[in-house]
Each structure stands twice: as structure tokens, then as C-alpha cells.
Image: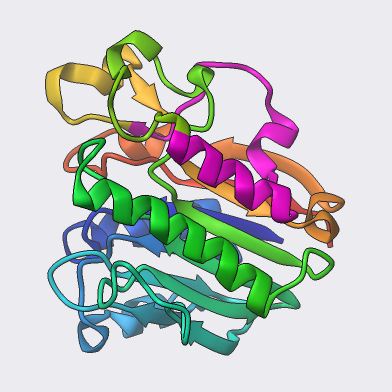
Amino acid sequence: MRIATWNVNSLKARLPRVLEWLEMAQPDVLCMQETKLADDQVPALDFEALGYTVLHHGEGRWNGVAIASRCGIDGHASGFGDIEDPYVGDARLVAATCDGVRIVCVYVPNGRAVGTDTYERKLAWLHRLREWLETHHSPDQPLVVGGDFNVAPEDRDVYDPAAFEGATHVSEAERKRFEALKEWGLVDAFREIYDSDRLYTWWDYRAGHFHKHLGMRIDHILVTEPVRARLRYALVDRNARKGEKPSDHAPLFVDLAD
């Protein structure tokens, strides 16, 4: 079973690239973030032509999350439900069960700048995510939380820690919230396979950062122990970041033993 996550940075703008990647990489499940579509704008027929059903949670111009699955979609849910959402209305979480694995697709707020209201609400959102997991799920169940977390968990996950000093994505408070998810019972699947530094999922569009490999690892697939035991392979597909009009993120996927 291949499970992928990709911040597509507008599904409308990137649809041909997404469909091409689905045909090439053949994931069974793809979590997408920043679709920037309302639910009634999703090009469902294009995905269905490739054998995928799409579950989408969006509000229009910004944000938006989706799960595309070719192995079933059951028990879908969106948002935090009765848990207070500091970014209410932003369409940042959608979940479904695909072939016995609970898939949670998240788009964590950016935070903009340390010390601002948006940053404080980002910290609150990450705390609510753990509360939601504690309320609705168990570390004993097959569970995957994949998406754009907008957090680089360690210094080795950015090209130069000094370049990000005092910035969001690398602050101690954000990293503690990310670590709290792991303390609940989640494992960083990519790090289970690769322990090296300079392995990134996002590169700024400006100043040729991609070609200079000046990136960050902010997209993650976190899994519970029943899924970790099935891990066999992981990859950041840098090729999907190349070419004309790419997303600024590359897709990340993991392979599980059947």
C-alpha cells in the first residue's frame, strides 16, 4: 500500500501535474493540501478516470484538503468537530478510512511570524490536533496523519539553521507541539527509513532555491505503531518539483507491506 502527501498549491493550477504524477507514482492514497477549491469545484471526474475517489474539504480561495483513494473511502470526517478550532472555517483537516487504515490529511497553519496572533493560533491548532487524536483515535489503531505541517522538527531539516533564526517553522514552541504528537503515539515514517540531513520537501520559488537545494522538510507522514511495523520504503519525489509551474512542495510517499 502506497500512501502519499503533497501540498499541491492550487489543484486548479496544478491538476495536469497531479494527474500525471498519479499515473506515474501509482499511490493508493494521496493526501492533498492547499487545493484552494470549494467542494463543488473539485474535478472529481478526472480522478475517477484514473480509478480514484476524492474526499474534499474546502472553502474556496484558500487552504483546502483532500484525500484521493483507489482503495475505498469510508467513515469520512472533517474539522475538529466539537473541539474548538482556532482557525475555524479554514478547511484544514479531513479524514477517512482507506483499506483498513485511518487516513488524516492536515494542513497546519503557517504562523507567519513568531509572536503574532497567527503564530499563537498555529500553536493552539497543533495542540487541538493532539486533543482531537486523543478524543477520536488510539495509538493502537492503524493510523496515518499526513500533510503539510509547516514545522521543520530539527535543525537538520533546514538548509541553514542560522538563516531561520527567530522565524516560524523552526521555533522551539512549534517543535514541542510537533513532538507532542509523537509522544501521543505517532512515528515520523520518513525518519524511520532515512536518517540523513539535507532531505527536504519544500523549496522557496525565489532565487533558485530549488536548484541550490536550499529547502526545508515540513511535509510529514506520521504513523502509529501498527503502520510503522509495515513500513518498507519512503521517498520525496524531487522530480515533481521540476519543470514548468510546479508546486513549491514535492510529494512524499511511504510504502507499506500488505
Residue 12 located within the stretch drawn in magenta: no
**In the rendering, at what x and y percent does residue 176 appear?**
54, 39
Question: With 172 as the anchor, is 99 left or right in this view?
Answer: right
Q: Is residue 38 above or below residue 112?
A: below
Comparing 13 with 135, the one in front is 135
- Residue shown at 53% from the left, 76% from the top: 95
Q: Position of residue 175 (x, y in %)?
A: 50, 36
Relative to 174, residue 138 above or below: below
Query: Which of 126/53 is in front?
Result: 126
Left or right: 48 with respect to 253?
left
Residue drawn where x is 31% and y is 50% of the image: 120
The C terminus lies in quadrant: bottom right
* Nearer to the camera, 52 or 140: 140
The percent coordinates of residue 64 (x first, y second) are 29, 69
Viewer-side residue, 146 vs 235 = 146
Q: Residue at coordinates 13% horizontally, 25% vertically from top-left?
A: 206
Q: Is residue 137 above or below residue 181?
A: below
The N terminus, quarter of image: bottom right
Answer left or right for 201 relative to 185: left
Q: Would residue 237 be visible to someone looking at this image?
A: no
Occupied quadrant, residue 38: bottom left
How many marks do you count on the picture? 0
Q: Position of residue 89 (x, y in %)?
A: 25, 78
Q: Is residue 103 visible?
A: yes
The magenta segment: 173-202
Question: How was the colour assigned to the protein in this rendering?
Answer: rainbow
Q: Is 258 placed above or below 98 here?
A: above
Does the magenta run of residues contain 194? yes
Q: Residue at x 37, y 56 (%)?
A: 20
